[in-house]
Image (tube, rainbow, N blue to C red):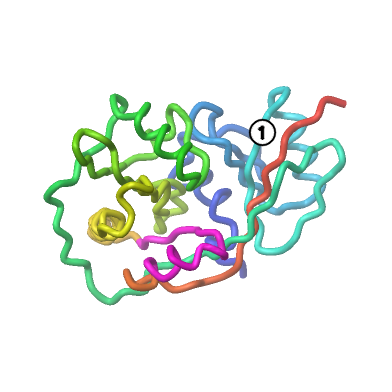
Amino acid sequence: MEHILDNPIYHALISGHGHLAKGVDGVKYYTEDITAFAGLKDNSLENLETLYQISAPDSLFVFFSKTPVEIPEKWKLLTHIDMFQLVFRGSEIPIADASGLTELDVAHVPEMMDLVELTKPGPFLAKTIELSNYTGIFVDGKLASMAGHRFFPSPYRELSAVCTHPDYLGKGYAFKILQEQIKRILLRNETPFLHVRNDNEGAVKLYQKLGFEIRTDMIAYVIKKELS
């Protein structure tokens, strides 16, 4: 039987994020202003055709797969990203120090988008913050580091948008934010997980130090709807 984390976006959109989902049975996607991710019950040509038919012109989607997928010609494959999926296997709730952390809200979105554009941790749109629980560290009034939550395939919750401004690398900011985020998830009786490029060795080592283990390989496909 497939584990729900083998298909985390689809399972998020039929469970914890069902209220944010558009689509039909077996083919779901987030509302366009929140994020560009789509989840298919299976990554078949039939479901990719359904996604094409029910989505708006010029739609761009990101979907995940554990194995390579053949992309139909009517979709333009923009890129694919080889990743690791990691799951928290720590035995204890971290003793996190929340001092110096700021709860990020809509007023911070322009700074958050600037930091994401600079560091490229993954897609972040104007209303991505609605996925919840973004926290950051400010230094001299500038957003130096942040992280938040993304997919919620209950009872798993994903950590995402983990990024630090290049001027503030090596100061432990991401580690501090992630400890707090892990604690919050565990206190809700949920399990943290995340995705990271498989060539980002520094980030992988950081996550392993925090108690994450590599669960599986994952591929992110970025596709754009081509008008036929």
Name the side, left or right, on which 73 lies relative to 163. right
Residue at point 61% right, 46% down?
39
Q: Is residue 197 magenta?
A: yes
The answer to which image quadrant residue 116 occupies is: top left
Q: Residue furthest bottom?
A: 91
Q: Residues within 10 Å of mark 1 (few under 14, many from 20)?
A: many
Q: Is residue 162 magenta?
A: no
Name the side, left or right, on which 170 lies relative to 19. left
Name the side, left or right, on which 174 lies relative to 125. left
Residue at point 84% right, 44% down?
72
Give the answer, above or below, for where 126 lies relative to 123. above
Q: Which residue is mark 1?
A: 60
153 or 78, nearer to the observer: 78
Q: Position of residue 217 (x, y in %)?
A: 60, 67
The answer to which image quadrant residue 182 occupies is: bottom left
Which segment did they paint magenta?
191-207
Image quarter in which the C terminus is found = top right
